[in-house]
Image: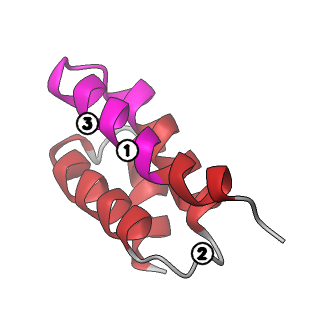
Amino acid sequence: MRSCTDRYEPLYLSWPAAAYLDAGEVEHSTAITARVFDLSEGLASIRPRARARLMAKRSEPHRSLAPVGALLECAKG
């Protein structure tokens, strides 16, 4: 059984992911966003996964970077 903290962690991680992307730290943002996808797996709340998809979409201009390409594939699934 997941704790309350488990439910909020992926959502809260999405904010620094956005900040890193805004600062031009694409690979760091991508790593955090991938973690958000991992942590949101199996959660009843759709918000963390929706935020992760938004971050993936914002990362699209950097799709030539391998981590971003992998993130975009993850966002499709």
Q: Secondary structure at mark 1?
A: helix
- Decide whether the magenta segment is chiefly helix, strand or loop: helix
Q: Residues within 10 Å of mark 1 (few under 14, many from 20)?
A: many
Q: Secondary structure at mark 3?
A: helix
Tag 1 residue: 14
The segment highlighted magenta reads 11-29
Q: Which comes before the other along the chain, label 1 or label 2? A: 1
**Colour setup of the view:** secondary structure
Could you tell me residue 15's position as x and y percent?
31, 38
Asked whether 60 or 45 is in front, the reply is: 45
Could you tell me residue 36's position as x and y percent?
51, 52
Tag 2 residue: 43
Task: Give the CA separation, mark 3 to mark 2.
Answer: 21 Å
User: Which image quarter: residue 47?
Assistant: bottom left
Q: Residues within 10 Å of mark 3 (few under 14, many from 20)?
A: many
Identify residue type, mark 2.
Leu
Residue for point 31% across, 59% down: 51
Identify residue type, mark 3.
Ala
Task: Find residue 18 and name its label.
Answer: 3
Could you tell me residue 30's position as x and y percent?
42, 39
76 shown above or below 63: below
Identify residue type, mark 1.
Ser
Residues at discs 3 and 1 in contact (Cβ within 8 Å): yes
Q: Residues within 10 Å of mark 2 (few under 14, many from 20)?
A: some
Task: Give the CA separation, mark 3 to mark 1.
Answer: 6 Å
Quadrant containing the N terminus is bottom right
Residue for point 31% across, 29% down: 26
Residue for point 24% across, 27% down: 19
Asked whether 32 or 63 is in front, the reply is: 32
Residue for point 29% across, 24% down: 20
